[in-house]
């Protein structure tokens, strides 16, 4: 598939998916199929203390851009923190994790390029047959070349 026209996703647009965690929400903005696999982008609201898996992806780089709140980031062995405006690059193959380390609700945009790793996120929320338990999620992560490395160290 080749993309032949641009896209405009208005404020509040995209596909909204609430999480099973109270206050956590996902807003899928640009889907892999819309960009011919070039990028996948979503916005997430995260209560204080919310954290990612400690993981790496084999097929995609990831970018996080903090819009609200205070986040901690681990890339390899390096740990840093940042508030609104902080932009983080997680290279493919490098172990990484993040956490809303502030005391308030946080909001961040996440982008995968190419979109391969974002296909897992899309599958969790949008596609029928999404994994329903930990074993199924792990199988799907392996399918999308995600590797969970252990508990989040942040």
Image: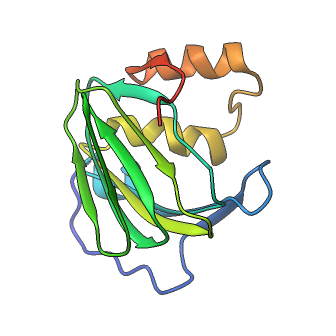
Q: Residue at x 45, y 39 (%)?
A: 119
Count of numbered labels shown in the rendering? 0
Residue 31 seen in this snapshot: no
Return the x and y of residue 138 as percentages of the image width and height.
58, 16
As drawn, 110 above or below 127:
below
Return the x and y of residue 131 as percentages of the image width and height.
69, 27
Return the x and y of residue 39 as percentages of the image width and height.
29, 52
Q: Residue at x 61, y 65 (%)?
A: 103
- Left or right for 15, reference 119: right
- Left or right for 98, reference 74: right
Return the x and y of residue 106 as percentages of the image width and height.
55, 67
When asked about the image quadrant of residue 70, the answer is bottom left
State the residue in front, 16 or 5: 16
Q: Residue at x 36, y 81 (%)?
A: 8
As drawn, 89 above or below 23:
above
State the residue in front, 3 or 41: 41
When asked about the image quadrant of residue 47, the answer is bottom right
Residue most toward the bottom? 11
Q: How is the image coloured?
A: rainbow
As drawn, 88 above or below 69:
above
State the residue in front, 94 or 113: 94
As drawn, 18 above or below 54:
below
Residue 145 seen in this snapshot: yes
């Amino acid at each position: 598939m080749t993309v032949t026209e641009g896209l405009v996703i208005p404020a509040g647009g995209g596909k909204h998916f609430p999480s099973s965690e109270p206050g956590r929400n996902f807003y899928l903005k640009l889907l892999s199929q819309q960009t011919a696999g070039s990028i996948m982008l979503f916005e997430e609201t995260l209560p204080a203390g919310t954290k990612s898996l400690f993981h790496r992806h084999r097929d995609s780089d990831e970018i996080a851009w903090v819009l609200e709140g205070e986040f901690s980031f681990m890339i390899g062995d390096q740990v840093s923190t940042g508030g609104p405006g902080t932009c983080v690059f997680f290279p493919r193959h490098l172990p990484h994790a993040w956490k809303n380390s502030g005391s308030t609700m946080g909001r961040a945009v996440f982008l995968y390029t190419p979109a391969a790793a974002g296909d897992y996120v899309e599958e969790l929320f949008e596609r029928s047959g999404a994994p329903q338990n930990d074993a199924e999620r792990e199988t799907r992560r392996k399918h999308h070349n995600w590797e969970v490395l252990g508990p989040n160290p942040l």
